[in-house]
Image (cartoon, grey):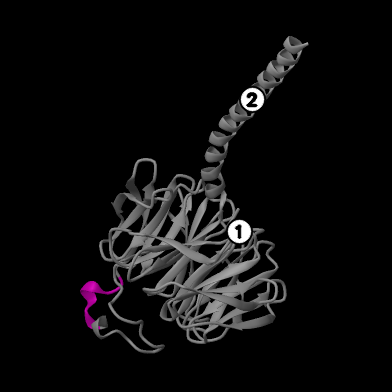
Amino acid sequence: MLNSSMARRTRMSLLLLALVASVAACNKQEEPAAEAAAPAAEAAGAVAYVSTQDAGVNVIDLATMQVTKQFDVKAQGPRGLAVTDDGKQLVVATRENGSVSVIDTATGEVVKQIEVGKNPEFVRISGNFAYVSSEPSAKAGPPPKPGEKHEEDDDDDDEKIPAKIAVVDLSKGEKIREITGGPETEGLEFSADGKQLVITNEADNTVTVHNIETGELVKTIATHEYGDRPRGIKVSPDGNTYLATLEFGNKFLVMDKGFNVVRTVDTAETPYGIAYDSKGERIFVATNKAKLLQVFDAKTFEKVKEVPTGNRCWHFSFTPDNKNILLACGKSDAVFVIDADKLEVTKQVEVKNMPWGVVTFPKAMGSLEQAK
């Protein structure tokens, strides 16, 4: 009887030990999986990249709308920026050294600086290639007022130097060729079929269309009779319409898919960045001096609403879920967060050192990007 009781207790102890060992083994197997999942979850988080002219690039976590880190671009004067399709690299134009900084987004480190030309501004990426506009004839200081000239305008040797659009092979890490634009190239857009590059040239008041493979000039659209200083350029999601803001015309130009001028639409003072929403139903225009983000119906071109913003707001982007708009306001040292449905400012994210442009990953519609 005693032996039987001891045997039962022994068996129970062994069963308990086996159960404990089994649970411990399961926990050990689960721990690495949880650790491995953490970086994946972080990588899947949506972010915004904001260039600041007097510093580097700020990274905003779009779940919290907080700046979480800054990237040192290893150069001065960052302006235009674009992210690769896989989100692994950020390409930033740096004005003072005439280059772009290629940044590893996982580490925040500059992996390469590539010379592209004097005063680089906009950056657009298509596949493995980055296209960078420049302003070799741009003068220091603010632009002249309508009707005024630069003090240096009498110097013909430096006036209206043709700008080059640098084409950078990101896989090789080098500039492979150039496309000749007008003086002071500004905005860049790809045609709907990807075969043409559309450029705004603010110094000679033209929009030019080029074969993207050969660089050949396909068409020139003069804007002077409608307004001067074309800046932003955007194609509609259906590829049938192109828009260009005319900073000194207080208008945006509407062109059909053959780049014929259809009409102009009046805006508030000094329009710059322009974009459609993802459905192509509304048009958004950042008006600098008016301190407004204006919203227009994309079919009727009637004004829908004006959203009061901050100082020197040039570029903006939707968030990847299309619920908010992020507007970089340089002289307010802030990114304004605007509810895309209510069209109301809901928050200001402090971003010091003159924020210039903003793009997101995953990619979204915006004045510097065109989500596919």
Q: Amino acid at mark 2?
A: Ser
- The residues colored magenta run 154-160
Q: Position of residue 362 (x, y in %)?
A: 56, 53
Residue drawn at x 64%, y 79% as measured from the top left = 344
**Residue 176, above or below 263:** above
In which quadrant of the rendered view does residue 242 lie?
A: bottom right
Viewer-closest of 233 and 94: 94
Query: What percent of the width, then of the height, locates residue 265?
Result: 61, 80
- Tell me, for residue 201, which label it has, or none: none
The residue that label 1 is drawn on is 320
Which residue is tagged 2?
Answer: 22
Rendered image quadrant of residue 63: bottom right
Camera-side residue of 240 and 113: 113
Residue at figure coordinates x 56%, y 62% from the top left:
62
Question: In the image, is residue 74 part of the stretch drawn in magenta?
Answer: no
Residue 123 can be seen in this image: no
